[in-house]
Amino acid sequence: MTGDDRTGPRQRHIAHLSLTAPDIASDAAPDGERYADILDLLTGITPHVKAVPPDAVQLDLTSALRYFDLSPYRVVQLAQLRLKALHGIDARAGLAGNRMLAAMAAETAAPGEVVLVPAERVTAWLRPRPVTALPEVDRSLATTLGRYGLHTIGQIADLPAATLQRLLGVGRARLLAERARGHDPRPVAPEEPAARLTADLALERDCLDPERQHRSVLGLVEHLGHRLRGAGQVAGRVILTVRYADRSASTRAKRLAEPTDHSPALASAALELLAGLGLQRARVRAFTVRAEDLRPAESAPRQLSLDPGDDRARAAEAVADRIRRRFGATAVGPPSWYGHPDADRPPRVIASTTGDP
């Protein structure tokens, strides 16, 4: 539903702005410096701005309405106008009473459009949508629910709590039931900065081949490891995001046994996350790998190894880093990266201190 709306003063008004059009590959998302400029721009509308990397922003407009003397819908249009004028971005926008609904609404918007979900229409708007539209439902969970004939959000909302708990466990079932009824109490507030490196790769075409997916993640991790070592940093956590052809996404995170900049250790964590998604024949459009909880390498403990192979691997890694610095990011890579269709297009690697979504 699109249009103008003025509701009571106690209603929260949350906007979700997607900074790339749905037909633009993820490597067209703003880089780190430009993303920071966009956050500063939107802070001029409301101080309650939350980054949703790599290509979205959420705003709580509730306190800004009196200042602008405009409806929430018009304030969102003002934000879109500023983004278009200063950054050339036709932002897709969702406007609703909480973060989840606003993000879901933005997914259905066309570039430059605002999709509004009024409070009185939330139930009717949610019920017919597929369960995969809920942020908490990845493909694995959707498959589990589908085995029991649960395909729409309305079917989840109608299910007795005890039945859903037997299927998913108490905590997960309670959260899913709340989301299926349109409830999301999370505030829109900037979080404490968390240093991170992000590498993403948009594939030239939707990928069905598990081997190519495996090689794509390895290539991303290799570039992240190179950047970490060059910056003298180690990472304590790895996060993998997979974006699909239907514009949905799955995200998984793994905390490392010890902070590291060693590409094989990072790759082991990222590939474990990839295997856990059980993609099988999923149509993958893009991968993003993030290294988080960064700290100086000299301040991080390292478990000593009696395996001489570990020292040889690190020595080879240092040689490869020197080659990349001299001849470019694609001059050398893991053996599985050679012959990859995207091998001559190095992933985009962004350093930032933006908080987690």
Image (cartoon, rainbow, N blue to C red):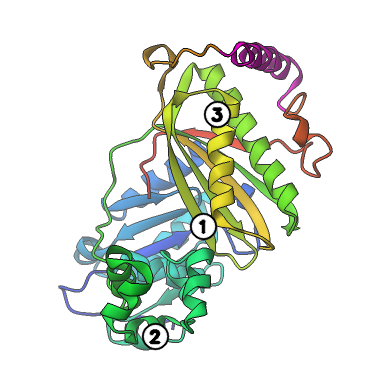
Residue 320: give x, y in percent of width and height: 70, 17
Q: CA distance from mark 1 to mark 2?
A: 22 Å
Q: Position of residue 150 (x, y in %)?
A: 46, 82
Q: Is residue 291 magenta?
A: no
Q: Mark 2 highlights which residue?
A: 154
Q: Nearer the viewer, residue 204 or 333?
A: 333
Mark 3–mark 2 Cα distance, whole angstroms, equals 43 Å
In the picture of the structure, the residue carrying the numbered disc 3 is 265
The secondary element bearing badge 1 is classed as strand
Q: Is residue 302 visible?
A: yes
Question: Residue, x 64% and y 15% (percent of image)?
Answer: 309
Q: Give residue 278's quadrant in the image.
A: bottom right
Answer left or right for 99 relative to 350: left
Badge 3 element: helix
Q: Relative to 253, does residue 294 appear above or below in the rendering? A: above
Q: Which residues are magenta?
A: 307-329
Q: Which mark is residue 250?
A: 1
What amino acid is at disc 3? Ala
Q: Residue furthest left?
A: 10
Considering depth in this image, is 112 or 330 the residue closer to the camera?
A: 330
